[in-house]
Image: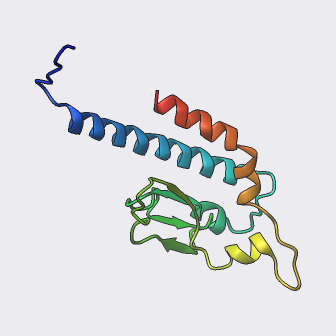
Amino acid sequence: MADIRIENNNKQEIKDELEFAVKRSLTAVGMQAVSDIVSSSDFPVDTGLLRNSITFAVSGEAPYESSYQSFKGDKQGAYRGKAPNDKIPAVYIGTNVEYAKYVQFGTSKMNGRDFMFKPLRANLGNYKEIMKAYLK
């Protein structure tokens, strides 16, 4: 039986490269998901505040967009903080606009309009392909 001896251990370098590839792939998925949501025909637009507030964040990172405003610029908002730093890397997609939940899920006087989950579900296959392409 032959002895195997490793002279150069690249374990940390390989780990770092893999983590970087995962982060890039999740960023690409987040960008595509935001695009899918805001370009959906079911997306309600009045002032544009909700539409412009949709963003994403990769685990442990700040949101991709730090601020947003309505089309007229009279209403605005900002994001602070970072996404949870999960053991399993993830991408978080959403908004902090207060009324978004009422538009999404409805109220006793208004039916919900699935502007978030429907386009995401419709494009799951695309997100998987993005991940595969970045992790080859």
x and y percentages locating residue 73 in the rendered image? 56, 68
x and y percentages locating residue 115 in the rendered image? 75, 60
Query: What is the number of callouts on the image?
Result: 0
- At 76% from the left and 59% from the top, the residue drawn is 43
Q: Is 17 on the left-hand or right-hand side of 117?
A: left
> Residue 86 versus residue 44: which sits nearer the camera?
86
Name the quarter where the N terminus is drawn: top left
Q: Residue furthest front?
A: 1
Q: Is 22 on the left-hand or right-hand side of 11?
A: right
- At 42% from the left and 58% from the top, the residue drawn is 59
- At 35% from the left and 43% from the top, the residue drawn is 19
x and y percentages locating residue 6 in the rendered image? 15, 24
Q: Is 105 on the left-hand or right-hand side of 9?
A: right
> Residue 6 versus residue 16: which sits nearer the camera?
6
- Seen in the picture, residue 46 relative to 90 is either above or below; the reply is below
> Residue 85 versus residue 101: which sits nearer the camera?
85
